[in-house]
Image: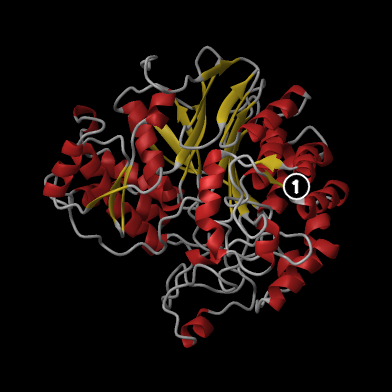
Amino acid sequence: MRDFQRPGRSAVYATNGVCATSHPLAAKVALDVLQAGGNAADAAIAGAVLLGICEPQMTGIGGDCFILMKPAGEDRVIGLNGSGCAPAALSAAVLRAEGLTTMPIHGIAPVTLPGAMDAFCRLNADWGKLPLADLLAPAVHYAEEGVPVAPRVARDWAEDAAILQGDARRFYLLNGAAPQIGQIFRAPGQAEVLRRVAREGRAGFYEGEVADDMITSLRALGGCHTHEDLAAVASFYTDPVQTTYKEVDLLEHPPNGQGATALLLLNILSQFDLAAMDPFGAQRAHIEAEASKLAYDARNRFLADPDHTTRLAHMLAPETASRLAALIDPRRAMADPAPLSEAVHKDTVYITVVDRDRMAVSLIYSIFWGFGAGLATQKFGINFQNRGAGFSLTPGHANEAAGGKRPMHTIIPGMLAAQGRVTMPFGVMGGAYQPCGHARFVSNLCDFGMDLQSAIDGPRCFTTAEGFKLETGYSPETATALTEMGHKVVAADEPIGGAQAIRILDSGILEGASDPRKDGCALGY
């Protein structure tokens, strides 16, 4: 139990339903949908789409999503891949001929097709209870009437605004500047797009005037995207991958997401007695950092489009983790095995919902970097993602950029299970940090017996190309000890990630927790 004399927040307990997400309006809307007779799938869609209006620097209808879902009355978990492909004409050889050795982060080259809207429509058609129009109505309302900009959103908006170009500046700046806390942001163009989807379903987005706006805008910016590319966007169902850690099963979405990285990382950590360490001391931080270097190196070698990932079984094999763990010196930091294929970023939203019938949804939704590619459509202001920056330009690499191919993704929804029963949908936002965040969250629960909110609140650290970043919750003594081990310790210049979780207790009660690093909350009824 937390110290009630210190700043903090309590977990939320409820019987009928809980939503946890990064913005309070989205959590409230999700709960409204549940109380109106919708299920967790309906509520997650409604909240997620609204998050694109509340946190447009993080996500939007021009982005991708991944979903894990436990149907009501079952303990089966289903994955839904809502990531889009590169346009058919994209060529790594052409990009290399232009002098590039890595994919650019911004501009037209990394813009892939938006897959999230197709996934939302499919999830609603296959698993929802309410009409899609009912789920989109709150986002339409707030896009028209406006949303007051929240404190964390304002901070991120100001940091990311510089990459906005052309029409994107018109739609995502107020009088040429990032909005301040409490200023109203409106997106009437997106409201019109959502009205068309409400009337026409998927066709309202991937066909007609909205599709014309996207393709015309992309072509004007120098893109090779076509109407045929857009029409071919299709989400698909898949099965999770998983591992067991201290009798808890961690389920992750399979490639092209990086969920397997979290599984490998936990498998490596299982070779060490973390429970005997100080949870926020130097030894645990060191072992986690070293294991992360190895797990991320494997990620960069193996993970790619599902049709091109061929070494997944090897990556998740117990002997692979054992061999990698043997490379870790408990007293000394190793050099990075290889540089990360993409730099650290934080721009993602996550929402989880559990309803009265115990359908559970874990949904993550992103445009990749802040404001994605920094580009938007001319008429409706749809912000394009830069997910293609996750591709490699190394010839022959499994993740080499190519037309019609999905890039390796950083966003990963998670679920926990125990003895065959799904116990918790959860997610940890934060770009490249996410596998490390998943592993730390599971370890906080299993190794240190933390309650759900404390497991989220605790200080985080992450090894990056810039150095070993420590949040302010770490002591100076810990930083000194890590420096003596050979780590290049730097103070984190921003919060590392943001988490949300809902635990389905043995009693049937729901426990929701939300990260104070974000503006959001957990709500239940």
Q: Is residue 506 above or below residue 435?
A: above
Q: Residue furthest right?
A: 199
How many marks overall? Answer: 1
Q: Which residue occupies 74% across, 22% down?
A: 35
Quadrant in the picture for residue 203? bottom right
Rendered-image quadrant of the C terminus: top right
Q: Residue furthest top?
A: 507
297 vs 28, left or right, is left
- Percent position (x, y) of residue 242? 44, 41
Q: Give the residue pinned by disc 1.
A: 121
Rendered image quadrant of residue 350:
top right
- Image quarter in which the N terminus is found: top left
Q: Position of residue 393 (x, y in %)?
A: 45, 75
Residue at (58, 58) in percent of width and height: 371
Residue 308 appears in the figure: yes
Crowding at mark 1 (Cα within 10 Å: few <14, some 14-19, many 20+)? some
Depth check, front residue: 482 or 360: 482
Left or right of 412: which side holds 324?
left
Q: Which residue type does callout 1 highlight?
A: Cys
Q: Residue at x 27, y 38 (%)?
A: 270
Which residue is at the far front? 175
Identify whether 422 is placed above or below 269: above
**Coloring applied to the structure:** secondary structure
Residue 245 at least partly seen: no
> Is 317 left or right of 145, judged from the image as shown?
left
Q: Camera-side residue: 203 or 98? A: 98
Q: Secondary structure at mark 1?
A: helix
x and y percent of residue 251 in the render? 47, 39
